[in-house]
Amino acid sequence: MASPHDDLLQVLSAYMSPILARSVLSRSLRRCGLTPGTLERTELRRVAQALETGSRLFVDPGKLAQLQEQLRRLSDPAEDIRPVDLPIHDEDDIGEARRASWSLCDQMGADRFARQKLTTIVSELARNLVHYAREGRLQIRIEPEAKRAYVTSTDSGPGIPNLEEIMSGRYRSKTGLGAGLRGIKRLSLKFDIDTKESGTRVEAEVQL
């Protein structure tokens, strides 16, 4: 995935020469007290505002509004964050689910702790689908304004007959089922699980 610096440079280079784009970007970063190496996605909005001012002298007036719109979209992409809906069948799908959760956090500009929290929840739910239900679906939805992620796991497996014992901590499983579910609950802002013989549905809400 491209760095925030490279993303900004790519946008600017569509409206001015690459050399001039680098110069304008460097001046805007210095104005914000940043360098290419310290620029994080959480700082994109502030840098984009500086770039809107710094690029006025070098961009065709007829294209300035278009450049400004691209910079705003890049610095605040929340409205473009689409839900993820993944079929989970095997270990490769668990890895794909992890990457998807990390990408969503990246788009949101979430900090490292929030990324790790969401990725752990997604990984555990996906692993449960593979190991216990054999297959299922994992959905991740982001609510940008509330800065929350909603993760839903559904399957048509045999259900969890001893759920109360598992969630209370009394059950000890060699495969780690109980620890995984309890860990998900601890990391979640809200947690709900509905299980029956026809399948299980787990919902977790995560603060980003």
Image: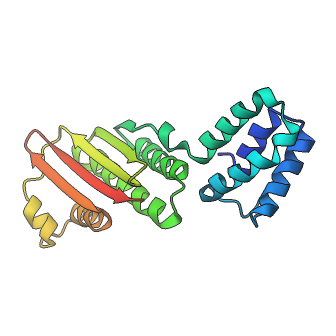
Q: Is residue 35 visible?
A: no
Q: Position of residue 74 (x, y in %)?
A: 63, 43
Q: Is 162 above or below relative to 75?
A: below
Return the residue found at the far bottom: 170
**In the drawing, does residue 120 fall left or right of residue 25?**
left
Q: Position of residue 123 (x, y in %)?
A: 38, 54
Quadrant for the N terminus, please.
top right
Q: Position of residue 110 (x, y in %)?
A: 51, 58
Q: Position of residue 55 (x, y in %)?
A: 82, 43
**In the drawing, does residue 115 fall left or right of residue 201?**
right
Quadrant for the C terminus, please.
bottom left
Q: Is residue 112 visible?
A: yes
* The quarter of the displayed image where residue 124 is located: bottom left
* The quarter of the displayed image where residue 30 is located: bottom right
Q: Nearer the viewer, residue 159 or 42?
A: 42
Question: How is this picture coloured?
Answer: rainbow
Return the residue found at the far top: 62
Q: Nearer the viewer, residue 71 or 172?
A: 71
Q: Residue at x 47, y 67 (%)?
A: 113
Q: Residue at x 12, y 52 (%)?
A: 160
Q: Is 67 above or below relative to 6?
A: above
